Image (cartoon, rainbow, N blue to C red):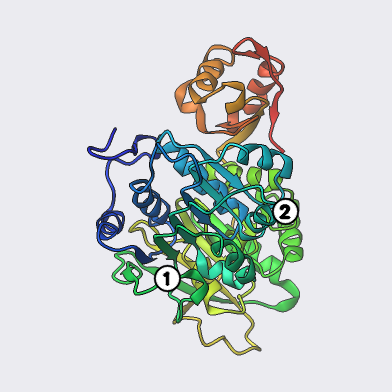
Amino acid sequence: MKIPHSNFSLEKLGISSLNEMQQEMLQTSGTNNDIILHAPTGSGKTVAFLTTALGKLSKEQQSVQLLIISPTRELSIQIEDVFKKLSTGFKVNTCYGGHSMRVEENNLSVPPAVLIGTPGRLADHVRRNNVDLSEVHTLVLDEFDKSLQMGFESDMTEIISELHSLKHKYLVSATKLEQIPAFTRIQNPVTIDFLTGQSHRINYFGIHYIPTDKEGTLLELLCNLPEGKTIIFCNHREPVVEITDFLKSNGVVAAAYHGGMEQDDRERALIRFRNGSADFLVSTDLAARGLDIPAVEHVIHYQLPLKEAEFIHRSGRTGRQDADGVVFLFLDAQKEVPAFIPEHELYDVIPDEPLPEAPKWKTIYISAGKKDKVNKVDIVGFLHKTGGLRPDEIGLITVMDHSSFVAIRSDIAEQVVPELRDQKIKGKKQKIGFAR
């Protein structure tokens, strides 16, 4: 539906109206140029700052007007996706490490109204004179604390120094900052704080483990858990790989997610986790924030983080949108528990329970996407006509630029996929198979 007196649509986001936090930011921006928004992960901060900033954009201005700086490529891509779903008619481009510099240079040759990107890549474009930011009037610093932690202060300073027409500054974070650095040029801001008064709760449970059998304890815990999405957090990529392999070797479907993976592999891991093809995601802190992963029932700190902020962000993956969450803490009985760990009950893992049920969905890959003029309706029609699938046998569909991923029921997948291979979608033969 189109929102009255506005230049955006919420229909494709699956919502009919803005929530309280989003409405407050929109109203506050009418009389305040500098806003700091504190709100939990998953509360809709992206929609809040996008709908607020959109009111500042002009169709007549043929230059970059809105600049959004985010710490990671995943978050940058996610913001772009939300923006496109708002159907504003404004051009948007996203720049991040790992993406083709040549493609980005070509995109920037015709300036977008909205530019999203990571600090390092944006600073690189500034140095190469690939983009003119002198007419940017609105700046969003999303997950700003994360950008500082990742060491992007100098890049952000360089970028913001190029914003000669800056009027509106929005700093967004899921944690509170003790001090706002001067380079942000934020002065006398209004703070909107939605970190308190949340109606949901998180239940914390501690698990004592024997160091020589920590992986075994994890497997037994997973066998104890009720059905639902679970994220298992580690501090480094090596244990992520080791635990994922261990779980798979013991019959548990799990997806790995860490910064050392190729971007395509990371995206596929998240797709499988979102659509129910893998109920367990083993990850570094990369998945602690900035990603759209709804309905996570359990978070497991397989390795406790070193800092309180990361503990908060990890734990905040569950207990979202007014739903209660459960967090498990792996505790070495021989070591002192960090001071930031909240009160918790000890959890007795019951041994010899059956393995978790296999996922109800499997993900198939189709070698066509948005750039090939293929959309979700085309894919559903193809699966129904060619594969004979009913609506309840088709799950979440993710359409990317040159590929698509579809969840189909596991009990029919092996039978259906061979029938779909090399079939035509919109008159063109496509590669179709199980996503790796």
The secondary structure type at the circle numbered 2 is: loop
Q: Residue 106: which quarter of the image?
A: top right
Residue 157 in the image, given as x and y percentages of width and height = 58, 68
Quadrant occupied by the C terminus: top right
Residue 186, which numbered label? 1
Residue ranking furthest to the left:
4
Depicted 25 relative to depicted 113: above or below: below
Question: Dot 2, how many residues are within 10 Å of its Cα: few (below 14), some (14-19), or many (20+)?
Answer: few
Q: Nearer the viewer, residue 256 or 287?
A: 287
Q: Is residue 221 left or right of residue 202?
A: right
| Residue drawn at 54 percent across, 50 percent down | 116
The secondary structure type at the circle numbered 1 is: loop
Residue type, numbered disc 2: Asn
Q: Residue 217: which quarter of the image?
A: bottom right
Residue 78 in the image, given as x and y percentages of width and height = 52, 47
Q: Which mark is nearer the camera, 1 or 2? A: 1
Q: Using the numbered discs, state the Cα–Cα distance from disc 1 to disc 2 in whole angstroms.
A: 52 Å
Q: Determine which residue is flagged by label 2.
A: 250
| Residue drawn at 60 percent across, 62 percent down | 232
Q: Nearer the viewer, residue 35 or 229?
A: 35
Q: Is residue 355 visible?
A: no
Residue 89, which numbered label? none
Marked residue nearer the N-terminal end (1 or 2): 1
| Residue drawn at 55 percent across, 19 percent down | 383
Q: Nearer the viewer, residue 317 or 245?
A: 317
Residue type, numbered disc 1: Ile
